[in-house]
Image (cartoon, grey):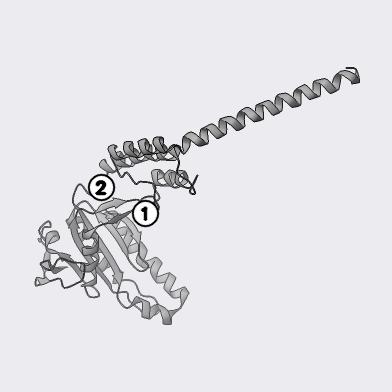
C-alpha cells in the first residue's frame, strides 16, 4: 500500500476505536445510573421482603458459614461495598431464596426442634499455661478426635469449635445424650503429660434460628448456660431435653433450678449418667 494511503486508514481505525470506547463509556455510565437508581433499589428491596428467607441475607453475620451459598454471597456483597447496587440486591435475592430452600430441607433452622450440645474442658486453661503449646495441641487433637467422632457417630453436626470444646446440633435429644456420654467414657483413656481431661457437657432442646453457618437465639444461650452448670465429667441436660429421652440404662440426678443470667428462672436441669 502506498505510504500516502496508510495514514488515512490508520486515522480511520483510530477514530473507530475511539467511537467504540465512547459508546462503551456511555453504556457503562447508563448501567451505573440504573444500578444506583433509588426507585429500582426500593423495588428490589421490597421484592426481597416478599421472598422467602432472610431479607437481609448478605451481611457479615448471615454469610459467616462455609456453605456454597454463603461463600457466593460473601463474594457478591464485596463487589461494591462502598455504594448501593440494584444488581447486588438482585443477586442476593436469588441466594436468599436458595438459602431458604436449603434450610427448609435441612435441620429445622428455626422451624423444628433441635438438641443443642455444648462442651468444654474444666481446668484446661490453667493446665495449658504450664504444659506449653506442644502438649496443649496434642491434647486438643486427641480430645477433638474423640468428641467429634462421637458427635458424628450419633448423627450430630459440629456447628463450631470453641477452643477446648464444641457446639453441636442433633435432630434428637437422645442422640445428643448418647454422643456426650460416649465421649465422656472415651476421654477416660486420654492422658497428656499426666493430665486427664475433664469434659463438661450441656444439652438443651429448642428452636434456634440458623444464621449463616451459626445458630443464634435464646435456646442457644440456654444450652451454653446448661453446660456451664455442669462439673468436670458431668453431662447436664435441661428439663425439655429430659422429656425427650429414654432413661432406660441411664441415671438422672436430682432436679435443680438453673440459676444463670440469660436463662429462664423456672428452668430446671439434671445430671445424666450411665448406670
The spot of residue 204 in percent (x, y) is: 19, 61
Residue at 80%, 20% in the rendered image: 9
Q: For numbered disc 1, what is the local secondary structure? A: loop
Above or below 160: residue 25: above
The spot of residue 37 in percent (x, y) is: 44, 37
Q: Which residue carries the number 1 mark?
A: 61
Outermost residue, front side: 38
Label 2 or label 1, whichever comes before in sequence order = 1
Q: Which residue carries the number 2 mark?
A: 107
Residue at 35%, 40% in the rendered image: 45
Is residue 194 visible in the rendered image? The answer is no
65 relative to 118 in the view: left or right: right
Mark 2–mark 1 CB contact (< 8 Å)? no
Q: Quadrant of residue 239?
A: bottom left
Q: Nearer the viewer, mark 2 or mark 1?
A: 1
| Viewer-nearest residue: 177 or 89 | 89
The spot of residue 196 in percent (x, y) is: 32, 76
Report, in whole angstroms, how far the alpha carbon at label 2 lies from the one at label 1: 19 Å
Residue at 49%, 49% in the rendered image: 82
Amino acid at each position: 500500500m502506498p505510504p500516502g494511503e496508510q495514514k488515512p486508514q490508520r486515522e480511520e481505525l483510530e477514530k473507530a476505536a475511539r467511537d467504540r470506547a465512547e459508546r462503551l463509556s456511555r453504556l457503562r455510565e447508563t448501567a451505573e445510573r440504573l444500578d444506583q437508581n433509588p426507585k429500582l433499589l426500593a423495588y428490589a428491596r421490597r421484592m426481597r421482603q416478599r421472598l422467602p428467607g432472610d431479607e437481609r441475607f448478605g451481611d457479615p453475620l448471615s454469610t459467616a458459614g462455609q456453605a456454597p451459598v454463603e461463600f457466593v454471597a460473601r463474594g457478591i456483597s464485596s463487589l461494591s461495598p462502598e455504594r448501593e447496587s440494584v444488581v447486588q440486591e438482585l443477586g442476593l435475592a436469588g441466594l436468599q431464596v436458595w438459602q431458604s430452600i436449603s434450610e427448609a430441607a435441612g435441620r429445622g433452622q428455626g422451624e423444628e426442634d433441635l438438641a443443642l450440645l455444648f462442651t468444654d474442658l474444666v481446668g484446661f486453661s490453667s493446665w495449658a499455661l504450664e504444659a506449653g503449646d506442644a502438649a496443649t495441641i496434642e491434647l486438643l487433637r486427641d480430645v477433638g478426635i474423640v468428641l467429634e467422632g462421637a458427635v458424628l457417630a450419633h448423627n450430630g453436626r459440629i456447628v463450631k469449635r470453641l477452643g477446648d470444646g464444641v457446639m453441636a446440633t442433633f435432630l434428637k435429644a437422645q442422640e445428643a445424650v448418647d454422643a456426650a456420654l460416649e465421649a465422656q467414657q472415651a476421654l477416660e483413656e486420654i492422658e497428656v503429660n499426666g493430665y486427664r481431661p475433664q469434659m463438661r457437657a450441656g444439652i438443651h432442646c429448642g428452636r434456634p434460628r440458623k444464621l449463616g453457618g451459626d445458630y443464634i437465639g435464646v435456646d442457644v444461650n440456654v444450652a451454653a448456660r446448661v453446660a456451664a452448670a455442669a462439673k468436670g465429667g458431668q453431662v447436664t441436660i435441661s428439663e425439655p431435653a429430659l422429656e425427650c429421652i429414654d432413661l432406660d440404662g441411664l441415671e438422672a440426678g436430682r432436679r435443680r433450678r438453673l440459676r444463670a443470667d440469660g436463662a429462664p428462672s423456672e428452668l430446671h436441669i439434671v445430671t445424666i449418667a450411665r448406670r
